[in-house]
Image: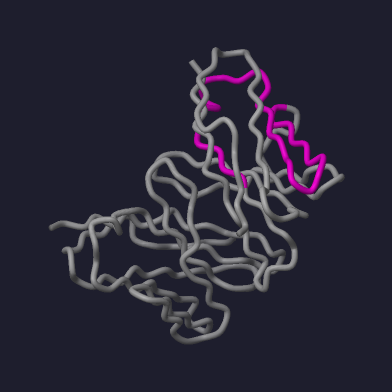
Amino acid sequence: GQNIDQPTEMTATEGAIVQINCTYQTSGFNGLFWYQQHAGEAPTFLSYNVLDGLEEKGRFSSFLSRSKGYSYLLLKELQMKDSASYLCAVMDSNYQLIWGAGTKLIIKP
Amino acid sequence: GAVVSQHPSRVICKSGTSVKIECRSLDFQATTMFWYRQFPKKSLMLMATSNEGSKATYEQGVEKDKFLINHASLTLSTLTVTSAHPEDSSFYICGASDGVSSYNEQFFGPGTRLTVL
């Protein structure tokens, strides 16, 4: 079956750095997405990785290792507004998104 | 660009009634639309995929007679929850793809919170 695993919840301090991991097992791979979702709102796009390596975009970076079925989202200089759920999603061979359950990130002052 | 709207954002209805949710792509043509539901603290669950002018493809376990999907134009898809029951209460999100984005990106609507009493 297809499976996306990520931690349920993480806590970090304002101004610090946090890494959210995601491991996946899917039928085929056409890229991995990270989304941010605030409670009661739709997911918003953060990043896309299809090749191995690190993609940096401002305070957010995303890493992919296809051989390990592993990705992480790195958030730097955390701000209170970064408190949200972070969803890892993999596009499978049918170009369908397979979603993780999300990691709730709590930022403390 | 790539804005998707959903209406209504929130609806409360009585058990047994039908509810229609609209999803519109405002500044692009959505060749494919996706309907998801999400329970609290759970991942998005794909319900169905629809291509403009074609019948929707439903995921296993999703009742097509209960969740009617119409993708009549390249900018509008509707999901009708027929004879709604309390267990249908959920957060429904639509996603839209223009078929030309470099990585088949989906753009999401703001979601509809359905509460069935």
Q: Is B73 placed above or below B29 here?
A: above
Q: Is A53 placed above or below A17 here?
A: below
Q: Is B107 placed above or below A20 here?
A: above
Number of numbered discs: 0
Q: Pick whichever, A82 or B67, lies toward us.
A: A82
Quadrant in which the C terminus of chain A is drawn: bottom left
Q: Which residues are magenta?
A: B66-94
Query: What is the x, y in percent for residue A60?
Result: 37, 73
Query: What is the x, y in percent for residue B103?
Result: 65, 71
Say which quarter of the image contains residue B17.
top right
Tell which residue pokes out farthest to the right in this image.
Answer: B53
Q: Is B32 placed above or below B85 here?
A: below
**In screen coordinates, is B8 left or right of A64?**
right
Q: Pick whichever, A23 or A34, lies toward us.
A: A34
Tell which residue pokes out farthest to the left in this image.
Answer: A109
**In screen coordinates, is A64 left or right of A109?**
right
- For image coordinates 69% across by 57% down, the residue present is B97
Residue B73 lies in magenta, yes or no?
Answer: yes
- For image coordinates 54% across by 12% down, the residue present is B14
Q: Pick whichever, A20 or B93, lies toward us.
A: B93
Residue B113 lies in magenta, yes or no?
Answer: no
Q: Pick whichever, A26 or A78, lies toward us.
A: A78
Tell which residue pokes out farthest to the bottom in this image.
Answer: A53
- For image coordinates 44% across by 75% down, the residue present is A71
